[in-house]
Image (spheres, helix red, strand yellow):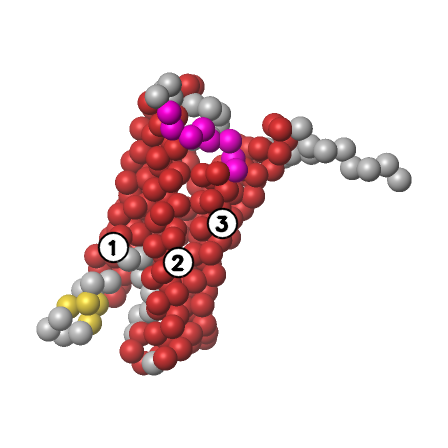
Amino acid sequence: MSARRPLDPTARRIRRLRRESWGFAVGSALFFIGVVPAYAAWAGPVGANATFFAGSIFFTTAGLIQLLLSGRRTPDARMNPADRADWWAAAIQFAGTLLFNVSTAAALIAAITDPSYVGAGWRPDAWGSAAFLVSSVLAVVATKDRGTLWDRDARTWHGTGLNLLGSIAFGVSAVAAFVVPSTGELLSPLWADLGTGIGALCFFAAALLARRTIGDAD
């Protein structure tokens, strides 16, 4: 039996981009599932928060692939503005995923320690949501001159638009999940749930569309 032929650099990059898109898709699906009331009631506080934590791990893995392994160039003095915005968008998004790792882990630990204290469970935190929003804006900037990017398919209007909408929705959820000191309740439980769910759906759709744009590697 002949040995499997090594992939050429282009095929390796495409495979990494495919893994990136699948990571974001699976992570988004888990965030959406975690906020569905029927699932949250069935899984309980620990199960629901474990789902969010698992989703954050997929996000972080995909973000790391996006930043380091997909082919993006490290910023230097010769880099064009679109590539520079693209790299910073990926870097800040990766930082945002790490912040979501921390907040989902904290929510899971709180659920294990005292399930009744968690209440509505995890919702996007302010810092992670802010990082996602800044990243999405930079991605839009990069998309304006996508013809000069290291890979013109690295950013597309449908992808950056959906990610921006998702980041805005996560931001709305973060604000709505603010605990009012005088009542000890969320500012808006409805929008805390809706923002998370809408944001997750936007990220999921963007990841699937990116998967179609990338195509198949041999």
For the C terminus, the image quarter is top right
Q: Can residue 32 be seen in this view?
A: no
Q: Nearer the viewer, residue 175 or 59?
A: 59
Q: Which of marks 2 and 1 is nearer the N terminus?
A: 2
Q: Which amino acid does label 3 sit on?
A: Thr
Image height of 203 relative to 186, above or below? above
Q: Can residue 72 be found in the magenta stretch?
A: yes
For mark 1, does the 10 Å Cα neighbourhood hold few (<14), some (14 to 19), or many (20 or more) residues? Answer: many
Residue 47: percent from the left, percent from the top? 45, 72
Q: What stretch is highlighted in magenta?
A: 69-76
Look at 39% across and 70% down and name the residue there.
108
- Is there a contact, CB below 8 Å, between mark 2 and mark 3? no
- Determine the CA span between mark 3 and mark 1: 21 Å
Q: What residue type is labelled 2?
A: Asn
Look at 47% across and 56% down and name the residue there.
57
Residue that label 2 marks: 101
The residue most toward the left is 182
Residue that label 1 marks: 126
- Determine the CA span between mark 2 and mark 1: 13 Å
Image height of 124 relative to 146, above or below? below
For the N terminus, the image quarter is top right
Look at 47% across and 61% down and name the residue there.
54
Residue 58: percent from the left, percent from the top? 49, 53
Which element is circle 1 on?
A: helix
Find residue 35 and report its image quarter. bottom left
